């Protein structure tokens, strides 16, 4: 077993960067993926131009450039802007599934230990730092390093930091802010002023702490960068080991990341006990169902249900993080009659979600026994990054039944035969549909007084068909033989 967490970077391909975070046992905790043509937009700062103000929605659309618009809540701005006005905004939520990016005028610049908030005035400390004495110590240091006219937020990784480390971070962030202001003063709107660093840089900035034992990279060009960052972040003590992977087998295969990613795209997730989760991601929310499956337990029913639900809660917290699921989440745990057991489950779920970098909140149990929670969305979920809607079913996961397709084909034949049916029809159909309809051909021919030749066509999608000839039987047979050199499978009756 590893001493701590491992960060594995796969950046050999120029078109795509991937970074995985593994727990001490080697299980995948987080996976970050960024492709060259779709860099993450969250955090980018723009000099935008107001295109349209919508008083009824208390919002405005701002032009970010390149034909892209951002959605701005006027409440964030504190006033109603006028069309054509230029304002600085930052992308708070990336565009997804037809929704434009959400932007805010409340800018923030993340550093290693601090977040600089222009026009702020307070010192905040990450809620994930729970030790009250440490919170007060960091707040005092924060007040001393806070620049006039700015606010700062002390990040979780700052626990145990010294004044010099915080001061250095503030100086770097102020230099960055000055460069953004300079670019804004000389560039016309709309334009991009600031883009966060590359994927590996961002992950190391956010994930590197004393719990990380090793950073593995497969690209020699990244080695010096990673060593420099580790040396800078851990100047006061020993940092994680930095290793260059040189094997022929891809590094994600060696560390089991590829297989874990495949499992993270599946709808069903098995638990060690034999119970399982069913995770359904929809446009508005994510629904997770907990099932006992093969788990029966060795004690009474109530204890079995509680144990299963607690095991499920632990895996749900992991899956939300691994799949980068954000927004509203509804969990249908196994019903529990014991109120004390319900409270144990809720408190356990809250504790498990405290370890999540993204803010998550458990609201409680509804009257139907469903647990509601939300999780902040900052990037595309794994499903949207790795998959697309099926071109055959349109993304529904459903296709038309064979018998429904057959009846649709029969109605088409009825329409073409009418009162004066042709001698023959040559119909090309998807192979599964053709085989399903073959048993009906004799009955259809008698009903419509027309010979029907049914050819299997591999190029047609599920349930599709087309009429290739309508007329004399001899011509239909000639057309059938000429298609693909006569190699197609043809279904026909034995009638003379």
Image: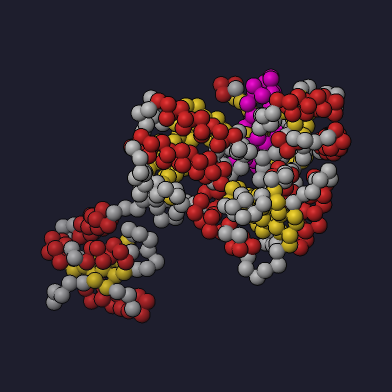
Residue beneath the point at 66% across and 55% down: 8
Residue 123 in the image, given as x and y percentages of width and height: 76, 25
Residue beneath the point at 64% across and 29% down: 72
Q: Within the magenta stretch, is there residue 80?
A: yes
Residue 403 in the image, given as x and y percentages of width and height: 24, 55
Q: Quadrant of the N terminus?
A: bottom right
User: How is the model colour-coded?
Assistant: secondary structure
Q: Residue furthest bottom?
A: 485
Quadrant for residue 109, please give it: top right
Residue 246, compared with residue 118, is above or below; it is below
User: Image check: 173 left or right of 464?
Assistant: right
Residue 269, compared with residue 89, is above or below; it is below
Q: Within the magenta stretch, is there residue 468?
A: no
Residue beneath the point at 37% across and 31% down: 336
Residue beneath the point at 61% across and 49% down: 23
Which of 371 and 324 lies nearest the eye of the viewer? 371
Which of 285 and 332 lies nearest the eye of the viewer? 332
Residue 420 in the image, given as x and y percentages of width and height: 17, 61
Res. 450 in view: no
Q: Residue furthest top?
A: 79
Which of 50 and 91 lies nearest the eye of the viewer? 91
Q: Which contiguous range is marked in magenta?
A: 66-95
Res. 252 in view: yes
Residue 352, compared with residue 150, is above or below; it is below
User: Image check: 78 left or right of 264?
Assistant: right
Residue 193, compared with residue 59, is above or below; it is below
Quadrant for residue 493, please give it: bottom left
Residue 343 in the image, given as x and y percentages of width and height: 46, 27
Quadrant for residue 160, please give it: top right
């Amino acid at each position: 077993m590893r001493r701590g967490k491992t960060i594995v970077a796969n950046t050999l391909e120029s078109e795509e960067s991937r970074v995985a975070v593994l727990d001490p046992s080697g299980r995948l905790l987080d996976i970050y993926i960024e492709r060259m043509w779709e860099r993450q937009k969250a955090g980018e700062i723009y000099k935008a131009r107001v295109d349209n103000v919508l008083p009824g929605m208390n919002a405005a659309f701002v032009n970010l450039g390149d034909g892209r618009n951002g959605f701005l809540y006027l409440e964030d701005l504190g006033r109603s802007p006028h069309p054509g006005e230029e304002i600085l905004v930052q992308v708070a939520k990336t565009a997804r599934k037809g929704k434009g990016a959400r932007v805010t005028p409340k800018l923030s610049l993340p550093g290693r230990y601090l977040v600089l908030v222009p026009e702020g005035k307070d010192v905040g400390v990450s809620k994930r730092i729970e030790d009250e004495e440490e919170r007060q110590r960091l707040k005092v240091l924060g007040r001393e390093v806070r620049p006039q006219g700015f606010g700062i937020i002390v990040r979780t990784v700052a626990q145990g930091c010294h004044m010099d480390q915080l001061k250095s971070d503030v100086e770097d962030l102020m230099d960055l802010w000055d460069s953004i202001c300079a670019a804004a003063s000389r560039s016309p709107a709309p334009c991009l002023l600031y883009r966060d660093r590359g994927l590996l840089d961002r992950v190391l900035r956010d994930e590197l702490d004393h719990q990380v034992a090793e950073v593995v990279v497969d690209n020699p060009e990244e080695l010096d960068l990673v060593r420099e960052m580790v040396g800078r972040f851990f100047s006061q003590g020993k940092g994680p080991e930095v290793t260059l992977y040189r094997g022929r087998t891809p590094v994600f295969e060696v560390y089991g990341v590829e297989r874990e990613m495949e499992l993270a795209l599946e709808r069903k997730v098995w638990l060690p006990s034999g119970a399982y989760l069913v995770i359904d991601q929809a446009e508005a929310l994510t629904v997770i169902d907990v099932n006992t499956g093969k788990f029966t337990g060795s004690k009474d029913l109530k204890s079995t249900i509680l144990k299963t639900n607690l095991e499920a809660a632990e895996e749900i917290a992991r899956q939300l993080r691994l799949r980068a699921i954000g927004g509203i989440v509804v969990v249908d745990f196994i019903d529990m009659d014991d109120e004390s057991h319900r409270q144990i489950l809720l408190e356990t779920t809250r504790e498990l979600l405290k370890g999540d970098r993204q803010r998550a909140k458990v609201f409680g149990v509804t009257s139907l026994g469903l647990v509601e929670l939300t999780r902040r969305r900052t990037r595309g979920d794994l499903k949207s990054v790795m998959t697309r809607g099926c071109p055959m079913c349109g993304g529904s996961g459903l296709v038309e039944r064979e018998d429904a397709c057959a009846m649709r084909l029969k109605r088409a034949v009825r329409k073409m035969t009418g009162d004066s049916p042709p001698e023959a029809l040559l119909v090309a159909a998807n192979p599964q549909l053709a085989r399903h309809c073959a048993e009906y051909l004799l009955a259809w021919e008698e009903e419509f007084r027309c010979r029907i030749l049914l050819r299997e066509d591999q190029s047609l999608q599920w349930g599709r068909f087309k009429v290739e000839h309508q007329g004399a039987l001899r011509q239909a047979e000639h057309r059938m033989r000429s298609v693909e050199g006569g190699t197609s499978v043809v279904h026909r009756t034995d009638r003379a």
